[in-house]
Amino acid sequence: MIDDVLLRVTGLAKSVPGGRELFRDLDLVARSGQLIAIVGESGVGKSTLLNIFAGLDGADAGHVAVEDIDLGSLDEPALTRLRATRIGFVFQAFHVLPYLTLRQNVALPLALVSADRSAIGARADIMLDRVGLGERGDGYARDLSGGELQRVAIARALVHRPAIILADEPTGNLDPDTAARILALFSDAVREDGVAAIIVTHSEAAAAIADVVLTLTATGLTERRGVE
């Protein structure tokens, strides 16, 4: 039987400058097709945890493995390539580039690993269509609303068929209707592609779409709700 574990975290610990401990002895397993929501008080370290999962920040102790590859065993070029090919990240602030077209923004992860411009453009157009922006590939990101920017960010996170999607407050500062549409798009895409997804959120609506909801505290992650 093929192991469907895509992210395995063991014994993770992290403190901030000044010595305040964010968390310790943190374990997590995320499987193919599973959507996990992580909730907790502001300042508890949710965004930091997500950055550690992506290899954007380091832990004080413990291990993070993506598809059985320990991030700590990789040098920076190898880590950059792993992020570019196996991890999709939806940032809280979108990080969509305003003076690029929507197609160019979505295609960025592919452009890092491929020189086939026609294939890159075609895949970006497919993803824009999936998030309801298929007719706007030649438009510029600077002209979009917040909800549209978030849909571009989701398309970009999924375009390279990653194993893991990490999303930091994917519905933050959006109106309820736009947030609901984005959550539906996100959930559908995760299940269709069979990736593992982890959402950090304050939103109960976002947590409600998850298979498992975990609360982050200084002593690790506690399951609040599970779905068989």
Image (spheres, rainbow, N blue to C red):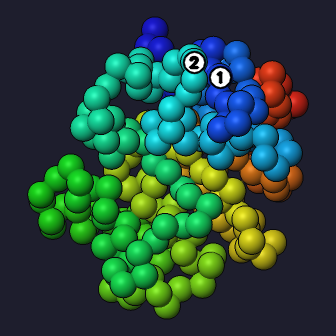
Q: Please tell me which residue is depicted at 54% across the width and 56% down the height of the picture.
A: 90
C-alpha span from label 1 to label 2: 5 Å
Q: Is residue 111 above or below residue 210?
A: below
What kind of residue is marked 1? Ala
Q: Quadrant of residue 135?
A: bottom left
Residue 22 x/y as whole percent: 74, 32
Q: Quadrant of residue 173?
A: bottom right
- Badge 1 marks a residue whose secondary structure is strand
Q: Residue furthest left?
A: 115
Q: Which mark is residue 22?
A: none
Q: Please tell me which residue is depicted at 87% across the width and 31% down the height of the picture.
A: 224
Q: Give the left or right position of residue 191, taking residue 159 as reference.
A: right
Can residue 184 be seen by looking at this rendering?
no
Q: Which residue is mark 1?
A: 13
What kind of residue is marked 2? Ala
Residue 140 x/y as whole percent: 40, 86
Q: Which residue is mark 2?
A: 61
Residue 217 x/y as whole percent: 82, 31
Marks 1 and 2: CB-CB under 8 Å?
yes
